[in-house]
Amino acid sequence: ASQFGMDEALEKLGIKKINEGTSTGSNNFASGEILDSYSPVDGKLIASVKTSTVADYEKVMQSATEAFKSFRVMPAPQRGEIVRQFGEKLRQNKEALGKLVSYEMGKSLQEGYGEVQEMIDICDFAVGLSRQLHGLTMHSERPGHRMYEQYHSLGVVGIISAFNFPVAVWSWNTALAWISGDVCVWKPSEKTPLCGIACQNIIAQVLKENNLPEGISCLVNGDYTIGELLTKDTRIPLISATGSTRMGKIVAKEVAGRLGKSLLELGGNNAIIVTPDADIKMTVIGAVFGAVGTAGQRCTSTRRLIIHESIYDKVKEALVAAYKQLRIGNPLDENNHVGPLIDVHAVEMYANALNKVTAEGGTILVEGGVLSGEGYESGCYVKPAIAEAKNSFEIVQHETFAPVLYLIKYSGEVDNAIELQNGVAQGLSSAIMTNNLREAERFLSVVGSDCGIANVNIGTSGAEIGGAFGGEKETGGGRESGSDAWKIYMRRQTNTINYTTNLPLAQGIKFDL
Ligand code: UN1
């Protein structure tokens, strides 16, 4: 990794051998066990972090709740200015942070930079939004009365994020939470704790330069037990959690049990429908990037291709040819398309999926396998695979976080394809490749895709930050990022003001004393 300038990147981001908290030293509540971070790129120890104990967590929560008291009264556009400065710092650190993301998580360097770009984009979005936290004004049914609504800051937002987008998901939440006047406590994935330290270092500098308390942005490292402290904590009105459906069900139950709000971004099982009118070249680019980008570890990764029988063989041949071109190897080397999976456990899940699809009667079209030898010492590099399958296979119904693509044939009308596409428990992203207006509109209509994201002539992954991001069914129903996703980070208050000397009751009720 040193040949790619990783040492300089780590130094720039303030990553030490053992990291306790932030480089500014003002929020070091990490006195627990040491958590080592090994790179899936070369299997080497990058650095270590200290986890937070229950007592540390208590200190974090005290600093967060204290910081909220002052932050909520800062005018929203001024909070936007803090987020603007944060976006500037991210621009300055884009190269270093992108490299760390690539090295600690394993995605290609281009995708590492892309992830940091998403952070910058959401900051820009949030800065503008900080002057647009609008409520409505309504007409009162009573004379001399005014009615309107306003949005107030909510409080401490708990963020639980996954390894696959180790920095961007945090920023989608924090940028909106901060302009809303909320403070954040973040538990990053224990597979990518250094990305957490790096982000915390960047925001800590911004807060320090503005004489603001670091409690506005808190970091707690550790395993699921730290996550449990967050979900059970009645001082946290909103938990935003990204990860597996299994995790989301536990979080949802816990948070609902105390009537807190949760924003869930869980598994996807995303399909591209390829109709007889599809542009094959575009289909192949969209499908291959969707299936092998981030080594198939995006919640938006393309898992299923639902192809019309009339063009099935043509698409199949084009895909098999494209997969032959894929270069698998060190993701820091920009010549490679596909990096490693996150760890050997993920490799096992990948291998299991391939065994299962053949056991259920599927046919392997592009052989998978674990790579070994020079450059593959970490044991995390696998070959992207393609299998012909049925939508009803148990394994196809399941989200495997790996580069395994299932080809499914449909015949007849586009409705048959839509039925297959919707015939899974998850509902995150979906796409149709077609030049047929009727098919495209049908797919986008109420009887079309049941997902939170539905694209035409675009793949399933790589959503822009300007739209609301999230999905239905087992994906959890949450919406983050653009559009009006900010509303969940604030509490809405309806206000009615009487400026007369009478007190007429609503609904015409008479109550004379
Ligand atoms: C995720 O995989 O958790 O749409 C998020 C995309 C990215 C975000 C993915 N913008 O693929």
Image (spheres, helix red, strand yellow):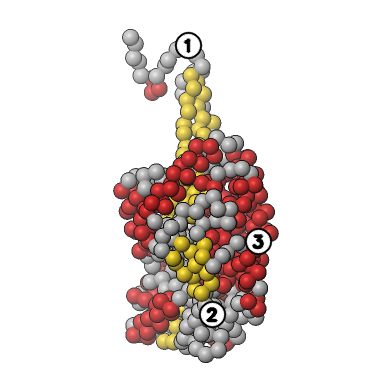
| Marks 1 & 2, CB-CB < 8 Å contact | no
Quarter of the image with the N terminus in it: bottom right
* Mark 1 vs mark 2, CA separation in Å: 76 Å
Mark nearest the camera among 1 and 2 is 2
Element type where label 2 sits in the image? loop
Is residue 145 visible to the viewer in this orientation of the structure?
yes
Question: Picture coordinates of residue 177 (x, y %)?
Answer: 52, 47
Crowding at mark 2 (Cα within 10 Å: few <14, some 14-19, many 20+) = many
Question: Which one is earlier in the sequence, the residue at label 1 or at label 3?
Answer: 3
Q: Residue at x 34, y 85 (%)?
A: 359
**Front residue of this view, candidates 140 and 52:** 52
* Mark 1 vs mark 3, CA separation in Å: 60 Å
23 on left or right of 229: right
Residue type, numbered disc 2: Asp
Direction bottom: furthest residue = 373
Question: Picture coordinates of residue 371 (x, y %)?
Answer: 50, 87
Question: Which one is earlier in the sequence, the residue at label 2 or at label 3?
Answer: 2
Is residue 296 visible to the viewer in this orientation of the structure?
no
Q: Residue at x 36, y 59 (%)?
A: 225
Crowding at mark 3 (Cα within 10 Å: few <14, some 14-19, many 20+) = some
**Front residue of this view, candidates 353 and 52:** 52
Residue type, numbered disc 3: Asn
* Mark 2 vs mark 3, CA separation in Å: 23 Å
Please name the residue that numbered disc 3 is placed on.
93
Quarter of the image with the C terminus in it: top left
| Marks 2 & 3, CB-CB < 8 Å contact | no
Please name the residue that numbered disc 2 is placed on.
42
Please name the residue that numbered disc 1 is placed on.
501
Question: Picture coordinates of residue 351 (x, y %)?
Answer: 41, 82
Q: Residue at x 38, y 23 (%)?
A: 507
